[in-house]
Image: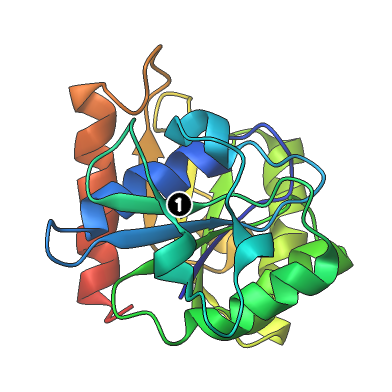
C-alpha cells in the first residue's frame, strides 16, 4: 500500500492520489484509491462519484472492492470515500485492504497528527506531496519523520507547482523528486498525466 501524505492541506494530495492510481492501474488490475481524511473528505468530488457507499460500508461480507465505486474522472481506478465515516471504520477498512490484489493508494490527512498516522501505520511506503515553498516543505519534513517511524518510509517526493528548481532531497531525506506543473485540469492535462506515469515508473524501479 502507498500512502500519499503531506504537511499541508490543499497541496494536491488527492489529485496526486488519483493521477498516480490511474498510472498504476490497468483494465484488468484496477487501482483502489481510499480516502482516509475524515476532516476534509474530498476524494469523491475529485473522482466524480457519490459520497456513499464508502469505507463505512465495508463488512466481513462486503469486501473493499465490492463496495468501491469506479471513478469517472480517471481510468482504471476505483475509489472508497470516507464521508461521515467514524475512525473505527477507517481502521476496519485499512485492515481489510491487505486482501486487495491491485495497487492500493491511501489519500492521507495532512500533517503529522494521530489521524495522519492512522493510514501510515498500514502503508508500505509513502509518497510525500508538497508545494515548493520552505513552509510547506518544513511541514512535510515532519510528516516524513512520522512515516519513517511507522515503517512507511518515503519512496518519492512530489512537488506541485513551481519551476522545477527546488531540490527537497536533503530536507526530506528522500532522493527521488517529481515536479508536477500547475495546470487548470490536472487530471486531464497531458503534461500532468506524463508526470503521474513518471511517478509510477520511479516507484516500480524501487519495487514499491
Please provide percent x and percent y for residue 135.
76, 38
The part of the image, by quadrant, that contains residue 170 is bottom right
In the drawing, does residue 36 fall left or right of residue 188?
right
- Tell me which residue sits at (29%, 73%) in the image: 102
Do we see residue 103 in this rendering?
A: yes
Closest to the observer, 135 or 153: 153
Q: The N terminus is located in which quarter? A: bottom left
Query: Residue visible at 72% across and 51% down?
Result: 37
Give me the residue at 82% from left, 44% from top. 39
Q: 14 or 139: which is nearer to us?
A: 14
How many discs mark residues in the rendered view? 1
Given the current orientation, which residue lies at the most extreme right position?
114
Question: Is 168 on the left-hand or right-hand side of 93?
Answer: left
Q: In which quarter of the image is residue 142?
A: bottom right
Q: Mark 1 points at which residue?
A: 79
Q: Where is residue 114 in the image (x, y as percent from the top left)?
A: 87, 69
Q: Picture coordinates of residue 167 (x, y %)?
A: 48, 47
Residue 34 to residue 40: above or below: below
Residue for point 31% across, 61% down: 31
Q: Which of 84 and 94 is in front in this view?
A: 84
Mark 1 neighbour density, 10 Å: few (under 14) some (14–19) many (20 or more): many
Image quarter of residue 45? top right
Give x and y (percent) for residue 81: 59, 49
Amino acid at each position: 500500500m502507498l500512502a500519499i501524505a503531506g504537511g499541508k492541506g490543499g497541496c494536491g494530495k488527492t489529485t496526486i492520489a488519483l493521477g498516480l492510481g490511474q498510472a498504476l492501474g490497468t483494465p484488468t488490475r484496477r487501482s483502489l484509491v481510499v480516502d482516509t481524511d475524515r476532516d476534509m473528505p474530498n476524494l469523491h468530488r475529485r473522482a466524480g462519484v457519490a459520497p456513499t457507499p464508502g469505507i463505512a460500508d465495508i463488512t466481513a461480507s462486503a469486501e473493499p472492492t465490492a463496495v468501491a465505486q469506479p471513478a469517472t474522472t480517471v481510468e482504471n481506478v476505483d475509489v472508497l470515500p470516507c464521508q461521515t465515516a467514524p475512525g473505527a471504520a477507517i481502521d476496519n477498512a485499512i485492515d481489510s485492504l491487505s486482501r486487495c490484489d491491485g495497487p492500493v493508494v491511501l489519500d492521507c490527512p495532512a500533517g503529522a497528527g494521530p489521524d495522519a498516522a492512522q493510514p501510515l501505520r498500514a502503508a508500505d511506503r509513502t509518497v510525500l506531496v508538497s508545494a515548493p515553498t520552505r513552509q510547506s516543505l518544513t511541514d512535510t519534513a515532519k510528516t516524513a519523520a512520522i512515516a519513517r517511524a511507522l515503517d512507511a518510509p518515503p519512496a518519492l517526493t512530489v512537488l506541485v507547482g513551481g519551476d522545477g528548481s527546488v531540490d527537497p532531497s536533503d530536507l526530506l531525506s528522500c532522493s527521488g523528486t517529481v515536479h508536477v506543473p500547475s495546470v487548470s485540469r490536472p487530471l486531464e492535462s497531458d503534461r500532468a498525466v506524463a508526470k503521474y506515469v513518471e511517478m509510477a515508473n520511479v516507484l516500480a524501479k524501487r519495487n514499491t
